[in-house]
Image: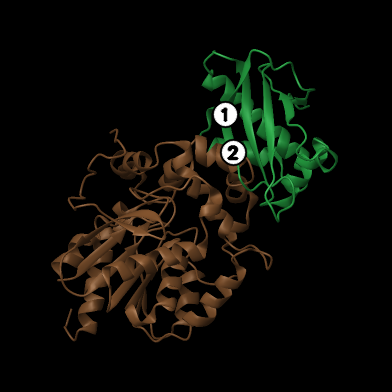
Amino acid sequence: MSEVSIVPAPDLSGLRRAFLLAEDRVGHYPEFRDFLARAFDLDAKGLAEPGYLRAPSGGVYVLVFIGRSGELFPAGVEISALLPALAPLDEDVADRDLWAILRWVIEGVGGEWRIEDLDATGRLYRIGAAT
Amino acid sequence: MRAAENDAPPDWPYETRHARVNGWRMAYIDEGEGKPVLLLHGNPSWGWLWRKTVPPLLAAGCRVIVPDQIGFGRSEKPTREHAHTLDGHAANLAALAARLDLRDLTVVCQDWGGPTGLTFALSNPERVRALTIMSTWAWPEPAAEFHTRIFPWRMMHAPLVGPYLLGRHAALVGRGMYLSVVDRERFRHEAQPVYEAALPDASSRLLTWTWPRWIPLGRDARAYERFAWLERELQKTTWPTLLIWGREDEVFDAETFATRFKAMLPHAEGPHLVTGRHFLQEDSGAEIGVMIAGFLGRLDGGAA
């Protein structure tokens, strides 16, 4: 059971986006783009609104989908944490949440992409959140 | 040992120079006099990878040019993936060679120094005298078995996973290189901090997950045609060529990859096997320098 879930757009007043990572080429393996398009209904919504995820810490993360002329949508995606406007980022919490989001993505992509392989890759490279 | 991005690393007493190449700032060293030798690194290293190879070449009377390819080392590091293409990186080398008017040049390449350097050589044949090829490839298929596996290779640079693992966590420049040398303890203490310091921030490590995505895994790969051209044209060449391979190389294993280069270039010397995994310069850099110097000496009619 994934600890990550899609949530409605929160009330953004008093919050800021704390940028965490950018993926310029989400269709490098097309099944990743297909999963995001499916999960967030992007074929219908297009660029109209970002996606929001609640992560294991309880924090909410915003996914901003990027379009590039001549490429299937979304071409890229940016992930930011939603934080109280003037609060610093807890990097350890954000890192664990990002790892959980990656596991959610891999689970959703499915097929030959397995959470077990993500976890093994994380352990091989000694990623704290993976151990 | 901790190292900072602009610290002078050990065994690298050379002046860092800069040239504009295709609008980017490229760092390089240019030492010695004589016929030029261009040493080309790949992902995720920089010119310092050749630190043990440079002295024997200088001692043999070579001029040695070692660029940090754009995106690595002390060169400019573009922050958008679309800034990086195989053709663009080859053109960067062409721009540097034109800027320095390099002729009678020996191109020495390893990892992505191979596809970029060999593409440069084939598109600038009037500048080239000889080649040395190490732990790389120059054809569209088949890919190395390692590169076809989900665990760990394709997972490591998969969408979103790449920016996290290789960007935020420096997985390739840290533990990735560590796993790809023979003497890991020495590497961990002496070399790993220097490589990590050269790519200190997640955004500076963009090319470490971008290059893996340029390895063709099928006919629809964006670099497939370039690699097909590379294979086709390379096997027409008659340049004196030296093949050096790491005995312990598990990425581009000698039995598959050095053998294939030898079949493409039957006139090539070697393959000579040295102690080394993929980053064979870390374990046998000086020996490689002596080998290249001897090879060039024989071309000049010497007895080396």
- Counting from the top left corner in percent of width and height, residue A70 is at 70, 56
- The answer to whether residue A74 is seen in the rendering is yes
Q: Are marks 2 and 1 on the same chain?
A: yes
Residue type, numbered disc 1: Phe
Up the image or down, B165 lies above or below B295; here it is above
Up the image or down, B107 lies above or below B172; here it is below
Which corner quadrant holds the N terminus of chain A?
top right
Furthest toward the right, the residue is A44
Which corner quadrant holds the C terminus of chain A?
top right
Residue type, numbered disc 2: Ala
Up the image or down, B38 lies above or below B9; here it is below
Is label 2 in contact with label 1 (beta carbons under 8 Å)?
Answer: yes
Q: Residue shown at 46%/76% (left/top)?
A: B261
Q: Is residue A23 left or right of residue B241?
A: right
Q: Residue shown at 76%/27% (left/top)?
A: A2
Q: Is residue B279 left or right of residue A70?
A: left
Rendering colour (chain A): green
- Counting from the top left corner in percent of width and height, residue B17 is at 24, 54
- Counting from the top left corner in percent of width and height, residue B284 is at 29, 59
Tell me the element at label 2: strand
Rendering colour (chain B): brown
Mark 1 — residue? A19
Q: Residue shown at 23%/65% (left/top)?
A: B64
Mark 2 — residue? A22
Residue situated in front as seen by the camera: B170 or A115 = B170
Residue situated in front as seen by the camera: A63 or B213 = A63
Q: CA distance from mark 2 to mark 1?
A: 8 Å
